[in-house]
Image (spheres, rainbow, N blue to C red):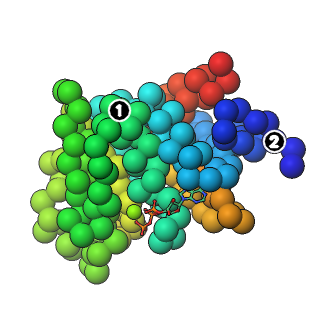
Amino acid sequence: MDSTSLGSLFYLPFKQQTFTGNQMRSSYVVQLDDEAATLFLGEQLAAILRPGLTVFLYGDLGAGKTTLARGILKGLGHHDKVRSPTYNLVEIYKLSELYLYHFDFYRFNDPLEWEEAGFREYFNQNSICLVEWPEKAGEFLHAADLKIWISYSGTGRIAELKAETEAGEQCLSRWQKQVSE
Ligand SMILES: Nc1ncnc2c1ncn2[C@@H]1O[C@H](COP(=O)(O)OP(=O)(O)OP(=O)(O)O)[C@@H](O)[C@H]1O
Ligand SMILES: [Mg+2]
């Protein structure tokens, strides 16, 4: 395959850019050969995420969304257990001055449940929000700065990372600099 090996990740040879009006948005595709690669990507993302950012994680059951969140938390200095929020809807982490909220809305049957759950205030300038199954919360969910799709590819996974806002764009630009150093 025509790809470049960097650490244990394989970066497929394209960065895509799309324009909405005059706004440029970047996306990257990363090949994740095993669980360690997903965790490693998470650790890299931890270095470029900033308070106030919301990240949506998409992918089928068992794709690796919680694994990626685990890597992010490890990169942010959390070394204890990371539970899947599937049953509690949210797991809360206080990491020095930062709150990280890890949501999983898989169990929502109706987007109204998002309104009723009272999570809106968790999305604020002092927190990082990671959201699994955002599509189950419907259109009233806080907008994402970054969207990450994880899909099955042979025995591994492919991740696509896409900036949705200027803050997300800056994040991906920091990430690109980091991985090309
Ligand atoms: N790149 C990878 N290649 C192969 N296996 C992986 C990779 N990344 C993670 N896995 C494995 O896939 C499974 C993913 O489980 P995980 O709980 O992270 O999925 P999920 O997307 O959060 O699922 P759910 O929608 O049920 O919450 C784990 O067993 C993990 O070890
Ligand atoms: Mg999960």
Q: Disc number at residue 3?
A: 2
Q: Residue drawn at (31%, 51%), measured in percent from left and top? A: 82
Q: Which image quadrant: the C terminus?
A: top right
Q: Amino acid at mark 1?
A: Leu
Asked if residue 93 can be seen in this view, the reply is yes
Residue 35 % position (x, y): 56, 53
Residue 41 found in image quarter: top right
Q: Amino acid at mark 2?
A: Ser
Furthest-bottom residue in this view: 109
> Does 13 sit above or below residue 69?
above
The residue labelled by disc 1 is 76
**Quarter of image, ligand 2:** bottom left
Q: Secondary structure at mark 1?
A: loop
Q: Residue drawn at (58%, 23%), measured in percent from left and top? A: 178
Residue 175 % position (x, y): 55, 29
Are the two marked residues, 2 and 1, in contact with CB atoms closer than 8 angstroms? no
